[in-house]
């Protein structure tokens, strides 16, 4: 047991002993209005004889009572007025109450802060950030309204990182009006029949108004700040639109759709193709390619299913044609015609923000026009990040954005293909092209693939890719490109790989240039800097999707879009904080890798305690029937409880299976609820139930089971 633990236990024992003495000796009988009135004359005589001694003694009693959170602070405050008068009584109580509150605050911090932080690190960190920004205003509001329990404020604030000096000074200032009212009432003690006489409806209403004052002051400060950021700009008297959206990818389309649904006047500006990267160069074409590649793999290995194999099933031009057909089938849902029919004014051209309310649009012919909007949403998306590798620029490299047009002209898949990047895009494309007949080398500078997943996920995926024929090179840095060869370095050793095509898939970056952000001094780093309501430095300009981070997913952009649209249109009435608590994602390799919440690595990094329950698919009936036994469901829960912290699934259809756990986490359903839900048989989703069953097995009530065993033995006679 550490010295700090011993000190904490001693402090808890001291508080416990003080409370025990208070209640066992019934000291509360002296902290009543009747007792105060009866003893007033005697107290007056004692104070008259030795005023300083009794003033100091009274102050110490007040500090002790408030520090220990004893009931009766109101009576003590009345007593201060009755015995010492208005000015001296107010002086004593003001300093004593603030001192006692601060001692209680520090005790709470010393005893509980580490324990709470260890279990709720992420939530505590968010609270600390809020306290740092507006904690003083918040505390002042609580202190000005005497309805809030005194000891609860001390306890709760002690768990934050608010500075002690701020806590003391704000507490003293905030409690002063209430202190004066009680001390003044104490000077007229004979007229006070009950404590409710002190806080009459009028006085209570006045204190409530006083409590609202810090919030009003905060709003005024916000208004001054807003006025400052708009200094130098001329705000239009009338606006052409309620909302202007720049970018017609997932984030922009959903934002415009919501605005049109609530009958706002909205313009959607797109400089490229409607549907953005996801439809045209990302999710849709890649998943169409992956499906064709998987079928080719299955045909080539049909013997495993009792069928005749097809040794060379790939017609690459037809595969690429099917991809374009998939895009064309989906495109009408994202088209100019559809959104125009919904009531959206769609402009094809490049949008640039020239002032906080004005967007300049340059159409395909170079013609310029301007529109004003009360609010603007930036949904410009992202683009592939290309590292600065010597010789790469002259190599004719491809990216996830350019590969479709280039390969669409080919008669066959690339013969020798190098892919740089072992993240989701790199692993998906490596597996797809090896199955379409390419020789594939996958190069990753880190020590493992899919760095955001757990090590066991990375290891299993690497094994599966190698089984398919991919040459997986982790821990290899791409040094330079020369004459259709890639030079790699691993430690001190260099190696050379020849290629016909090279795909760069090391990640994506926000598309920030050319939209006027730098001219408006909107803060950007790798992404646009936003508050928790998706507002930029200029509060009427919002951003969603890949330009914002922290996740570059289509579904994440659509999720943000609801918050941005509602806040942009109705934020003057009520603004919503964006919710990132449950964000799923999937990598569409075979098997798929799907993930929501924490995995083991992220939980350790966040300092969150967890337990792991794992169910391997090897004996899942549907997986056996499908020939898809690779994978597992891994469930992270709070130690000793069924609360789900996160789930990782590696399985065929893992992305579909994950939805059950996403719903459970969003609505606070635990492993017991999953276990108690009937799942159709035989399905892959049964693995979710069995993973919950593994959790249950590890939490068997062993004592109860031993008694049940005895009971059954007794029943047998």
Image: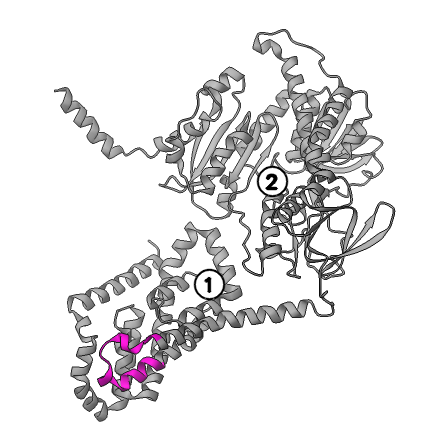
Q: Residues within 10 Å of mark 1 (few under 14, many from 20)?
A: some
Quadrant position of residue 390 = top right
Q: What percent of the width, then of the height, locates residue 320?
A: 75, 24
Position of 228 relative to 493 (above/below): below
Q: Please give left or right for residue 301 compared with residue 152 in the image.
A: right
Q: Secondary structure at mark 1?
A: loop
Distance between mark 2 and mark 1 Cα atoms: 35 Å
Q: What percent of the width, then of the height, locates residue 66?
A: 30, 72
The color scheme shown is one colour
Residue designated by label 2: 555
Position of 541 relative to 557 (above/below): below
Residue for point 79% across, 49% down: 350
Q: Please give left or right for residue 520 compared with residue 96 in the image.
A: right
The furthest residue to the left? 717
Q: Secondary structure at mark 2?
A: helix
User: Which of the image's four quarters has the C terminus?
Assistant: top left
Q: Main secondary structure of the magenta part?
A: helix
Between disc 2 and disc 1, the foreground one is 2
Q: What percent of the width, then of the height, locates residue 489?
A: 72, 36
Q: Is residue 658 visible?
A: yes
Residue 408 badge = none
* Range shown magenta: 180-201
Position of 411 relative to 641 (above/below): above
Residue designated by label 1: 161
């Amino acid at each position: 047991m550490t010295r700090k633990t011993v000190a904490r236990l001693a402090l808890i024992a001291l508080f416990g002993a003080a409370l025990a003495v208070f209640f066992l000796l019934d000291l509360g009988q002296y902290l009543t209005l009747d007792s105060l009135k009866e003893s007033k004359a005697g107290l007056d005589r004692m104070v008259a004889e030795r005023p300083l001694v009794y003033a100091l003694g009274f102050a110490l009693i007040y500090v002790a009572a408030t520090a220990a959170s004893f009931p009766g602070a109101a009576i003590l405050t009345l007593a201060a007025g009755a015995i010492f008068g208005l000015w001296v009584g107010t002086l004593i109580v003001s300093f004593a109450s603030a001192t006692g509150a601060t001692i209680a605050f520090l005790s709470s911090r010393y005893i509980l802060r580490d324990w709470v932080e260890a279990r709720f690190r992420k939530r505590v960190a968010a609270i600390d950030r809020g306290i740092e920004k507006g904690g003083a205003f918040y505390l002042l509001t609580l202190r000005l309204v005497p309805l809030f329990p005194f000891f609860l404020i001390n306890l709760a604030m002690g768990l934050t990182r608010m500075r002690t000096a701020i806590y003391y000074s704000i507490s003293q200032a905030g409690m002063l009006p209430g202190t004066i009212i009680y001390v003044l009432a104490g000077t007229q003690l004979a007229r006070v029949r009950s404590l409710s006489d002190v806080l009459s409806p009028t006085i209570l209403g006045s204190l409530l108004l006083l409590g609202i004052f810090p919030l009003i002051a905060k709003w005024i400060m916000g208004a001054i700040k807003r006025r400052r950021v708009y200094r130098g700009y001329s705000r239009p008297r009338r606006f052409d639109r309620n909302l202007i959206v720049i970018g017609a990818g997932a984030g922009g389309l959903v934002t415009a759709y919501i605005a049109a649904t609530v009958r706002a006047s909205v313009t959607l500006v797109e400089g490229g193709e409607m549907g953005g990267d996801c439809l045209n160069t990302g999710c849709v074409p890649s998943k169409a390619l992956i499906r064709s590649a998987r079928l080719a793999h299955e045909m080539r290995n049909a013997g495993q299913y009792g069928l005749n194999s097809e040794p060379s099933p790939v017609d690459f031009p037809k595969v690429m044609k099917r991809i374009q057909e998939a895009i064309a089938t989906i495109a009408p849902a994202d088209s100019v015609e559809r959104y125009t029919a919904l009531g959206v004014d769609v402009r094809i051209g490049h949008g640039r923000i020239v002032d906080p309310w004005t967007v300049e649009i340059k159409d395909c012919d170079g013609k310029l026009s301007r529109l004003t909007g009360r609010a603007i949403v930036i949904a410009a998306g992202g683009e592939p990040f290309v590292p600065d590798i010597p010789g790469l620029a002259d190599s004719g490299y491809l990216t996830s954005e350019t590969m479709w047009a280039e390969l669409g002209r080919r008669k066959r898949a690339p013969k020798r293909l190098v892919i740089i990047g072992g993240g989701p895009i790199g692993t998906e494309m490596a597996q797809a092209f090896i199955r379409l007949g390419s020789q594939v080398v996958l190069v990753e500078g880190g020590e493992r693939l899919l760095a955001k997943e757990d090590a066991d996920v990375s290891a299993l995926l690497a094994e599966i890719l190698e089984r398919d024929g991919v040459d997986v090179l982790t821990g290899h840095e791409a040094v330079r490109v020369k004459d259709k060869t890639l030079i790699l370095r691993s430690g001190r050793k260099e190696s050379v790989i020849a290629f016909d095509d090279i795909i760069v898939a090391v990640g994506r970056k926000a598309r920030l240039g050319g939209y006027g952000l730098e001219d408006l001094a909107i803060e950007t780093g790798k992404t646009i800097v936003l508050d928790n309501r998706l507002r930029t430095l200029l509060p009427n300009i919002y951003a969603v999707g890949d330009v914002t981070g922290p996740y570059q997913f289509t579904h994440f952009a659509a999720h943000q879009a609801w918050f941005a649209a509602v806040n942009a249109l109705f934020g003057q009435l009520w603004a919503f904080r964006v919710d990132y608590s449950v964000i799923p994602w999937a990598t569409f390799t075979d098997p798929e890798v799907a993930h929501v919440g924490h995995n083991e690595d992220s939980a350790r990094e966040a300092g969150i305690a967890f337990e792991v329950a794992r169910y391997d698919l090897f004996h899942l009936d549907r997986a056996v029937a499908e020939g898809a036994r690779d994978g597992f469901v891994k469930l992270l829960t709070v130690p000793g409880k069924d609360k789900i912290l996160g789930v990782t699934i590696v399985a065929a259809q893992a992305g579909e299976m994950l939805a059950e756990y996403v719903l459970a986490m969003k609505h606070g359903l635990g492993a017991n609820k999953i276990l108690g839900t009937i799942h159709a048989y035989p399905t892959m989703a049964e693995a979710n139930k069995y993973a919950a069953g593994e959790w249950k097995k590890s939490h068997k009530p062993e004592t109860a089971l031993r008694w049940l065993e005895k009971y059954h033995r007794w029943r047998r006679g």
